[in-house]
Image: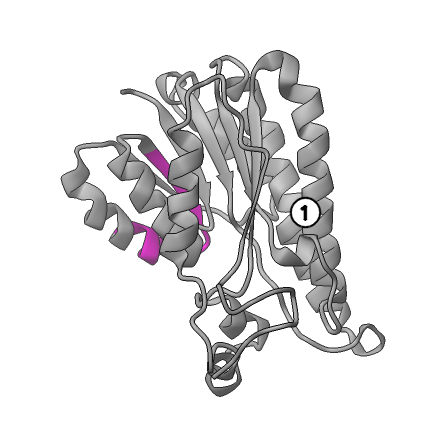
Amino acid sequence: MDKYAIVTGASAGFGEAIAKVLAEEKYNLILVARRGDRLEELKNTLASKQIKVLVATLDVRNAEDIHDWIEGLEDKVKNNLSILVNNAGLAVGRSGFQDGLLEDWERMIDTNVKGLLYMTRETLPFLMKNEGSMVINITSIAAKEAYAGGNVYCATKAAVDQLSKSMRMDLVHHKVRVSTIAPGAAETEFSLVRFKGDKETSKQVYQGFDPLQAEDIAEAVRFIVTRPSRVSIHDLVIMPTAQASTTLFHKD
């Protein structure tokens, strides 16, 4: 198989786990993230999978850089692009709206919404050439249910949820499938980023219950990409057994 898959935010967490699963499914990979050293480490880890792995140190918030990078890819890569996984995203801060920091809001909006738009818009001309191609957008339970202190983060993920529905309608005649995966509480770097490197506070988020792991979401991606072309998985919500809503947990 000579198909290529792009995974954004591939340097850790969901993105790294998704890359490993797609490698097992024999997709050639294009891994995108800001931390180039981690991408190189992942590329080396995947060397035994007998696939091609390209890495790009990019910030999805920069539309011009994404455009230039896509333009610079070899034609044989672009013409075999089959999957885009929009995984790059983050939450920053947990204050009430009235105390929110403008820089945090802009970082979330620019990454979670605008970055997804830029990457999808640049890759769609190539995805549309290949029948059965897929866009997989990683959202959050926060896309479905707001919670106190979530404000702008919840809004960005809800925006991606609605964008995905609209994309699906716009692309149905091009036979491009659009899926969303909305994880609940998952033990990745998510909380460490949200609390700006405060390891103790981040650790407390996951105490008392068994949270999702990155591999759980990667397995959902495997399920989506291995369906026959007649099947489109529109929306998956995946929660830890101990989580019933954004804020209701059973903790030991």
Residue positioned 73% across, 78% down in the render:
95
Tally the numbered discs: 1
Left or right position of 95 against 183 = right
Identify whether 129 is placed above or below 218: above
Please name whichever residue, 41 or 128, is drawn nearer the observer in this view of the structure: 128
> Which region is colored magenta?
29-40
Q: Decide whether residue 30 is among the magenta residues.
A: yes
Image coords of residue 177 (percent x, y): 55, 25
Please name whichever residue, 60 or 182, is drawn nearer the observer in this view of the structure: 182
Quarter that holds the N terminus: top left
Q: Amino acid at mark 1?
A: Val
User: Can residue 217 be seen at all in this image of the molecule?
Assistant: yes
Residue placed farthest to the left in the image? 48
Image colouring? one colour
Residue placed farthest to the right in the image? 98
Residue positioned 42% across, 16% down in the render:
79
User: Can residue 12 be seen at all in this image of the molecule?
Assistant: no
Q: Residues within 10 Å of mark 1 (few under 14, many from 20)?
A: many
Image coords of residue 209 (percent x, y): 46, 76
Q: Find residue 211 and report its image quarter.
A: bottom left
Image coords of residue 5 (percent x, y): 40, 32
Identify whether 76 is placed above or below 157: above
Q: Find residue 163 and report its image quarter.
A: top right
Please name whichever residue, 183 or 87, is drawn nearer the observer in this view of the structure: 183
Q: Find residue 176 and report its image quarter.
A: top right
Q: Decide whether residue 2 is among the magenta residues.
A: no
Give the structural element (helix, strand or loop) at label 1: helix
Image coords of residue 120 (percent x, y): 59, 33
Left or right position of 44 against 173 = left
The residue identified by callout 1 is 113
